[in-house]
Image (cartoon, rainbow, N blue to C red):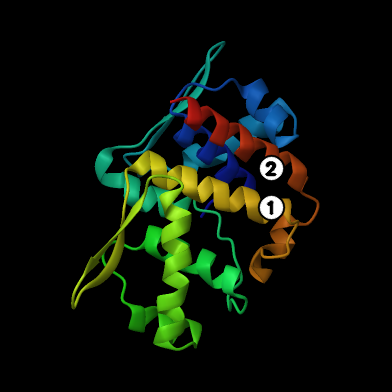
Amino acid sequence: MFTFREKIILNELYNFKKCEKISDLAQKCNVTSRTIINDIDNIKSKLRNSKIKLVTKPGVGVWIYVPEENRRKFEKDINISIGPSNPILPEERVIWIIKKLLDADGFVTFDEIAEELYVSKSTVVKDFDKVEMFLDRYGAKLYKKQKHGTKVIADEKTIRIIKADILKNAVSKHGDIIDDELRDVFYGIDLDMIKQILIETEEEFNYL
């Protein structure tokens, strides 16, 4: 639905939850203000029949309004997929599992993950030790319920911080763990610039 740069813009507006100047967005995306204005017009067109509103005010900037009931779907729409489609290395599996849990609407079982990753259930159990350690750094917790599975317990801000951090680390490796499907999208894009945007996002959250 949204192009890669449109997702960067929407993530910036949604995560910061404040008005952004067109010139600031242009600088962060390494394009002209005219390009950002065109992107915003395209986004508005795509959101025309939605309750989500992108608001612009001359001389002030642009901000976004996302109703509570639309947030879950919107977050999926602007999510920038990262990580290998078929993770093999333990660290790749851990990141894949974390994203799986963060994107899930409810519980996720060990059997489900094992089947999708083509590994044994015992391997998934071991991976979850690292998953729990990773999430603990952000104050997020794993809630396990017998016969139901596991899910992440964290507020929306924490989940966005974790996703931004994962993406920042992926981008910093310049494609080493970026999904092959995105290589054409990243062609010609200043990945260092994108990394800096995410670093700034994370730093701002840390001050909240």
* 127 to 162, vertically: above or below: below
What's the residue at 46%, 26% (across, down)?
63
Q: Quadrant of residue 14?
A: top left
What's the residue at 35%, 79% (across, down)?
110
* 171 to 25, vertically: above or below: below
Numbered label attached to residue 39 = none
Q: Residues within 10 Å of mark 1 (few under 14, many from 20)?
A: many
Q: Quadrant of residue 201?
A: top right
The kind of residue tagged 1 is Val
Q: Which residue is mark 1?
A: 171
Determine whether the residue tagged by mark 2 lies in a helix, strand or loop.
Answer: helix
Instruction: Find residue 10 and report its horizontal and vertical position in percent.
Output: 51, 39
Instruction: Find residue 25 and report its horizontal and vertical position in percent.
Output: 64, 28
Q: How many marks?
A: 2
The kind of residue tagged 2 is Ile
Q: Residues within 10 Å of mark 2 (few under 14, many from 20)?
A: many
In this picture, residue 52 sits left or right of residue 99:
left
What's the residue at 48%, 48% (across, down)?
162
What's the residue at 43%, 45% (across, down)?
138
Q: Is residue 185 visible?
A: yes
Instruction: Find residue 62 and report its horizontal and vertical position in percent.
Output: 51, 24
Numbered label attached to residue 194 = 2
Quarter of the image with the C terminus is top left
- Which label's residue is closer to the chain start, 1 or 2? 1
In this picture, residue 71 sits left or right of residue 17:
left
Say if mark 1 contacts mark 2, CB within 8 Å.
yes
Determine whether the residue tagged by mark 1 lies in a helix, strand or loop.
Answer: helix
- Give the Cα separation between the discs numbered 1 and 2: 7 Å
